[in-house]
Amino acid sequence: MKRELVRRAVFDCVIMIVLAVVFAFNYMLFIVKNQFAPAGFNGIATMIEYKTGFSVGYFSLIINVPLCLFAFFFIDRGFAAKTFIFSVVYSAALLILQAEPVLEAIASFQYDAQGVDTIFPALIAGAVGGYVYGISFRRNASTGGADVVAKFVSKKNPMLNFFWVNFSINAIIAVVSYFVYGETDGSGGMLYEYKPVCLCMLYCLLSSMVGNSIIKGSKSAYKFLIITSHTEEIEREIFVKLKHSATRIQAEGAYSHTSRDLLLCVVNKRQLIEFRDILAKYDNTFSVVETVNEIYGNFINVKKDENWVKKTLEKAEKVIGVKGEEKPPQAPGL
């Protein structure tokens, strides 16, 4: 068990290092040439670099080291450690990429929209940024800066969604960017436009959406709650045709007080139509279906348990008449 925890911690650290390098390349290839603030404290650093030339890499270290210390004591130690690794690697990668020889080498790969169709680099950068945010948060980490603040706020108030708290912070940064990216009009005055604000908001919105999608997971499925008077017949078809089992729950009608069986079964997307076809065969059958964002559990190991498979086949043959040569179902309820 201890070895598994160490292996997982090392793997998480490697993932954070890779994500930090990807995040640095995302900044250098799609953001720096197109004059818009990306998101969070990184957006503040971008605006400071635009005005003063002070590197985002150094700013990231100055801001994130204290924030990681704060997270260590007030949020979560594992979260703080992995966020610290990300921040240090990200800063180091940025400083390396901004070095003159390296900058010349990657210059041909930089997306310089030159003020035309800058929506495209913002879309690419937002999608990549959202991917990095989502994977980081799934590993109980973050990219630092406003992510740490949002994590602290959402910990104090769990009802607040992490990414939408972050988006609210970024909206303020987007408004500030309106005044940062102004240009002189030739007569000593300043000419401001909403383009940097729109690009910043687009980046933030897209990164929040992509991050949220990754947090929810991709192992989506459908949960069926079935009220029927044909429990055994439906169980048999689920077992034989879908290679699943189901959970039987005793229920009672609120009006008639008639006892009925309620079946709970979760199936993947590919089996949705086949499952509906099974239910359509039986009268006095009512079902409710819900989308399940992700499924957790040690189901793979359960299926490899030969004793469990043997017992399941024997019980199925006794209860619903399924022969032993049939392929065993997945874990109960799935």
Image: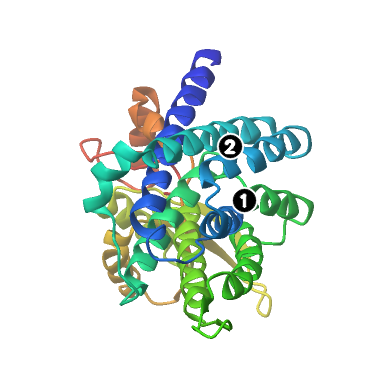
Q: Which residue is more in the foreground, 82 or 154?
A: 82
Going by the image, does 307 lie left or right of 41? left
Q: Find numbered disc 2 in the image and state the secondary structure of the residue it sits on.
A: helix
Q: Which residue is mark 1?
A: 147
Q: Residue at x 73, y 40 (%)?
A: 75
Crowding at dot 2, Cα within 10 Å, few <14 / some 14-19 / many 20+, comes out as: many
Going by the image, does 111 lie left or right of 24? left
Q: Which residue is more in the foreground, 78 or 332?
A: 78
Looking at the rendered structure, which numbered label has been put on residue 83?
Answer: 2
Question: Where does the image place residue 73, in percent across and percent down from the top left?
Answer: 78, 33
State which quadrant residue 78 falls in.
top right
Closer to the N terminus: mark 2 or mark 1? 2
Question: Where does the image place residue 42, in percent across and percent down from the top left?
Answer: 56, 53
Q: Amino acid at mark 2?
A: Thr
Q: Find numbered disc 1 in the image and state the secondary structure of the residue it sits on.
A: helix
Q: Amino acid at mark 1?
A: Asp
Q: Are marks 2 and 1 in contact (CB under 8 Å)?
A: yes
Q: Residue at x 38, y 38 (%)?
A: 99
Going by the image, does 61 lie left or right of 135? right
State which quadrant residue 265 falls in.
bottom left
Crowding at dot 1, Cα within 10 Å, few <14 / some 14-19 / many 20+, comes out as: many
Q: Which image quadrant: the N terminus?
A: top right
Question: Where does the image place residue 158, in percent across and percent down from the top left?
Answer: 73, 55
Q: Which residue is more in the foreground, 74 or 305?
A: 74
Give the Cα distance between marks 2 and 1. 10 Å
